[in-house]
Image (spheres, rainbow, N blue to C red):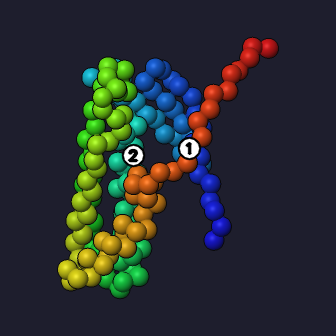
């Protein structure tokens, strides 16, 4: 299979709210009120955590099928800790992003602990979101000025 391109495009709805579109879906991003937002939607870093959990869910089920066992139910807990001082402009001492992220997969299954150990290893190796979080990905960030006509 060749490369697949994913994209989101949208606009600022307020200083803390972004409305984007991807494929046929609309995504809204906001900040909690204690960070200046209206708390009407998840914030950007919560979307990162949800993306990680969603990716682990998909890959977990694919790998379980490949290993020949069934997951009756999969609970996923993901959390990350960050200090907001840098993105708020209060300090440059801390990094802006997560200090750490923890993901717990809690499958309901009859698979042995040995099988689950192999399953976890393969989920970690194959999850694109984990790969993006753990490794540097080349980024190109630019500004394009709109001129009044």
Residue 130 visible? The answer is: yes
Check the image and report above or below for 25 versus 110.
Answer: above
Residue 110 visible? The answer is: no
Q: Image point 27% across, 73% down: which residue?
A: 72
Q: Residues within 10 Å of mark 1 (few under 14, many from 20)?
A: few
Task: Quickly name the residue at label 2.
Answer: 48
Q: Earlier in the sequence, mark 1 or mark 2?
A: 2
State the mark number for residue 59. none
- Report, in whole angstroms, how far the alpha carbon at label 1 lies from the one at label 2: 16 Å
Query: Nearer the viewer's eye, disc 1 or disc 2?
Result: 1
**The furthest residue to the front:** 93
Pick whichever, 67 or 140, lies toward us: 140
Q: Image point 40% across, 69% down: which residue?
A: 125
**The furthest residue to the top:** 148
Instruction: Name the quarter where the N terminus is drawn.
Output: bottom right
Residue 48 location (% of width, % of height): 39, 46
Residue 78 location (% of width, % of height): 27, 52
Q: Residues within 10 Å of mark 2 (few under 14, many from 20)?
A: some
Number of callouts in the render? 2
Residue 10, image quadrant: top right
Residue 76, image quadrant: bottom left
Q: Image point 43% across, 58% down: which residue?
A: 131
Residue 106 location (% of width, % of height): 22, 65
State the mark number for residue 139. 1
Q: Badges 1 and 2: C-beta atoms under 8 Å apart? A: no
Instruction: Name the quarter where the C terminus is drawn.
Output: top right
Check the image and report above or below for 58 versus 44.
Answer: below
Element on which disc 1 rests: loop
Q: Image point 37% across, 27% down: which residue?
A: 87
Element on which disc 2 rests: helix
Residue 114 location (% of width, % of height): 23, 82
């Amino acid at each position: 299979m060749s490369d697949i391109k994913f994209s989101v495009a949208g606009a600022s709805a307020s200083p803390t709210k972004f409305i984007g579109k991807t494929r046929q879906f609309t995504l809204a991003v906001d900040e909690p009120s204690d960070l200046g937002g209206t708390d009407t939607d998840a914030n950007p870093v919560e979307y990162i955590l949800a993306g990680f959990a969603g990716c682990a869910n998909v890959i977990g089920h694919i790998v379980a099928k490949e290993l020949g066992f069934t997951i009756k139910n999969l609970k996923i807990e993901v959390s990350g800790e960050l200090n907001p001082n840098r993105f708020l402009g209060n300090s440059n001492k801390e990094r802006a992003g997560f200090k750490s992220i923890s993901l717990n997969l809690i499958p309901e299954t009859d698979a042995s602990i040995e099988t689950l150990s192999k399953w976890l290893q393969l989920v970690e190796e194959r999850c694109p979101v984990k790969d993006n979080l753990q490794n540097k990905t080349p980024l190109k960030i630019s500004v394009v000025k709109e001129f009044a006509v």
